[in-house]
Image: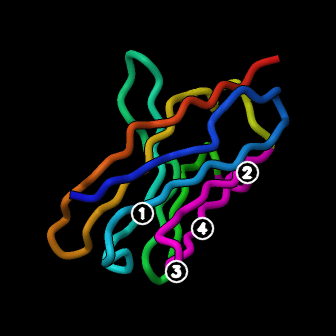
Amino acid sequence: QVQLVESGGGLVPPGGSLTLSCVASTITFRLYTMGWYRQVPGKQRDLVATITSGDDTDYSDSVKGRFTISRDNAKNTIHLQMNSLKADDTAVYYCNARHMITRRDDWGQGTQVTVSS
């Protein structure tokens, strides 16, 4: 079990920026692929971005070019820099940790991002 704590959510106007952070409790952080997912009420949880221990990244088409995922292995932390935010980006954003060997998924509690004027 990996404890994940998200922060940085809030209310932002369209076109604005926001940065999310997630701190992982594990001492073997380099064995996890980390990611951000988001969910709107009544819909499934969707991929936003993932990042491997080697800094390989994957983004959903809807956020490519606007969002940037990064990781700081010394601090067991990942970030999601969100620019040019749209109303469609409004969702609860969840931090995810997937173990490279066991494939076990752990999730944070989520942080609300609301894009509205």
**Label 3 belongs to which residue?**
74
Q: Quadrant of residue 41?
A: top left
Helix or strand or loop: what does disc 1 sit on? Answer: strand
Q: How far apart in space, not on screen, are marks 3 and 2 (Cα)?
A: 26 Å
* Quadrant placement of the N terminus: bottom left
Which percent across, then down, holds residue 24? 40, 61
Looking at this view, is 76 or 33 the one in front?
76
Looking at this view, is 38 or 106 the one in front?
106
Amino acid type shown at disc 4: Ser
Amino acid type shown at disc 2: Arg
Residue 72 placement, left or right of 13: left
Q: How far apart in space, not on screen, are marks 1 and 3 (Cα)?
A: 14 Å
Helix or strand or loop: what does disc 3 sit on? Answer: loop
Q: Which label sits in the foreground, 1 or 3? A: 3
Name the residue: 69% across, 49% down: 19
Name the residue: 38% across, 45% down: 108
Q: Are marks 3 and 2 in contact (CB under 8 Å)?
A: no
* Span colored in magenta: 64-83
Q: How far apart in space, not on screen, are marks 4 and 1 (Cα)?
A: 9 Å
Marked residue nearer the N-terminal end (4 or 1): 1
